[in-house]
Every structure is written in structure tokens, then in C-alpha cells.
Image (cartoon, rainbow, N blue to C red):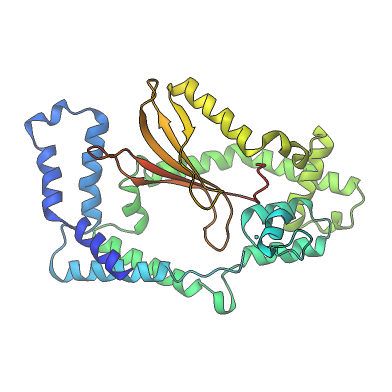
Amino acid sequence: MPEVVKFELRLGQSKSIYGAFKDIRESLGWHTFGDAKKRVVELKIKEATLNGVSLEGDKKEQFNKIQQESEKLSVKFDGLPTTTLGLAAQIAASKNGPWILTLDDPSFLSIMQHAKNRSFREEFYRAHVTRASYGDLDNTSIIDQILKLRLEKAKLLDYNNYAELIMTTKMATIDKAEELLENLRTASWNAAIQDLEDIKNFCKNQLAKEANDFSHWDVYFWSERLRESNYDINKEELRPFFSLPKVMEGLFKLVKMLFGVNIKSADGVAPSDVKFYCVKDSSGNPISYFYFDPYSRPSEKQGGAWMVEAVYPRHSKLPIAHIVCNQGGTSQAL
């Protein structure tokens, strides 16, 4: 990892690459560039600046030390062993149990919504909100160090704080982002309060013991019961109608209708849950590829969902991307 960081620093601080992009921006043909091309060039120049290309001497040395130390801290992040019964049974390698329940979101949300044992919900909720914050797995000091290093980095690049630095490559600004959050809060606050009151009243009408002591670990459970009561819909009963192959088939039809491209399965890869697809134009010519990894694997993948480029288009090479999700289980139902 240290060698990778050194290489990335050398690449990011390359004055020849930085100078080449500046030459493009100052060239006579700059005015002929479209907005997208101009945006790419401007971003590359900005990224080089944020990578410390303009720093010299002690400042550059300190910047590089911060980058290397930040990378070391990021890989030290620990979490509790993390995991719905389908996934739990898979992890335990037994269809009949015992099940291993972990704290990744698919498992957590399912337990919060469906576990009838309130004490179990409370235990699970507390474990989820305090994960990686106590004992041998406490990340608090690591987070503090990362925040300190980020501030140092921002100051070296003449920013007041890390938020200012990170927003320089974004189309939004800090003020606009905060304004958006406040607009959302203002518009949703009364509705959210009413929703919570409706959930509490429903719980009380069901004569539940927790009605007079309603807490965080009750919200998901009684929200799901209220939704089932109002709409007579059970998510688990809907799952067979939205199996992964059906969802993907529908998605690919929509993409073809909107963009005129066809997506077809390409050569298989291991493990079998990971799929490889080819994107073809209307003439049937390949224009790109992507890997699709839909299921949660707590021991191998971090939570969330994301897309990143694996291979950038260059000369005769077609672009390849990763699309990663964390759906629970491998039941082929989303």
C-alpha cells in the first residue's frame, strides 16, 4: 500500500501532466472545445492542485506525509462482524441454522422491521449504532487523527477547512448544500412528526406494551405493521415477483428504449453471483462492459452501493466499470 500511495502522489504531482493540461486550456483551440471537454480539462488541473502539485520544499514533504498517514489510518478501520436469515444461513453454511446475524444494512433493516421480540430489536439496534466505537474495535481515535490530517492538508492548500477543499471539484457549494438540506428539513419536518405520531397511535391501538415507552428500536417495526395494515401489502410476499433476472430484464429494456443500446451477458466470471455484461450500440458493436455484483458479502465488501471505472477508454480499449450493491442473501429476489 505505501508504494501505491507513493505512485499516486508522483502521478498526481506530475508537473509535466499538469503543464500539458494547462497548455490545452491556454491553446488557441480552447474555444472550440465543448463544455464537457472543458470540464474534464479544468477538473484535471484542479485535481493536480489538490494533489499538491504547486507545493515545494517542506510544504510538499508535509503534504505527502499526511497523504501516506491518512491511507494507513483508512485501512485500520475495524467493524464488528457484520449480517435476514437467508444471508445468515449462508454465512453459517447451514440451511437449518444456527444463523449468524450481522450488522450490515440488509440484515439490520430486516430485523428492525420484522423481529417480534422487542428486547432482541433493542439489542440489535444498540449494537448497530455503536459498532466500531468501543473495545478493541473502537475507531474513535482513528477518526480523530483522520480529521486532524484532513484539516492540515486543507491548510497546506490554502483552504479554511476540508469541506472547502473537497467541494472545489463539485458543482455545488457549501452554502448551496446547506441551503438544500435546510429546505428539505423545513419541507419534511411537519410530515415526519405526523408520520411518527401515526405510528405511535397505531402501536397504542394494537395494545402493545411498548406503546407508552416507544423508542428507536420500535419505529421500523411498527412502521412496517402500519404500512401492512393500511395497504395490505407484505414486502416479502412481493419478492418472488421481483426476482433479480426479472428486474435486470426490465431495466435493460428501459435502457434500450431510452438510449438505443443493448445489454447482453458476456463471459461468466467467478464467483457466480458476479455478472459480466456487454453494452452494444444499435448496430451490435460493443461500446463498453461492466461487472455487476449485487449481493452483500460482509467479510469482503463494505456497505452501500457504488459505481467506479475499472478501465478507462483509451485508444482501442473499451471502458469497463464495476456496479456494486449490497442486497441481502442470494435468493435471486431483490
Residue at image position (9%, 37%) is: 26
- Tell me if residue 293 comes above or below residue 92 in the rendering: above
Q: Nearer the viewer, residue 297 or 175?
A: 297
Res. 5 image quadrant = bottom left
Is 24 on the left or on the right of 199, as rendered?
left
Res. 334 image quadrant = top right
Q: Nearer the viewer, residue 194 or 284?
A: 284
The tally of labels here is 0
Residue at image position (64%, 61%) is: 103
- Tell me if residue 41 comes above or below residue 48 in the rendering: above
Residue at image position (40%, 28%) is: 280
Is 41 on the left or on the right of 75, as rendered?
left
Q: Residue furthest left?
A: 28
Residue at image position (76%, 66%) is: 98
Q: Residue furthest right?
A: 207
Q: Position of residue 119 (x, y in %)?
A: 81, 65
Q: In which quadrant of the rendered image does the N terminus lie?
A: bottom left
Is 294 on the left or on the right of 149, as rendered?
right
Q: Position of residue 273 (x, y in %)?
A: 56, 48
Q: Position of residue 254 (x, y in %)?
A: 53, 25
Is 121 on the left or on the right of 164, as rendered?
right
- Tell me if residue 251 comes above or below residue 321 in the rendering: above
Q: Position of residue 170 (x, y in %)?
A: 34, 43
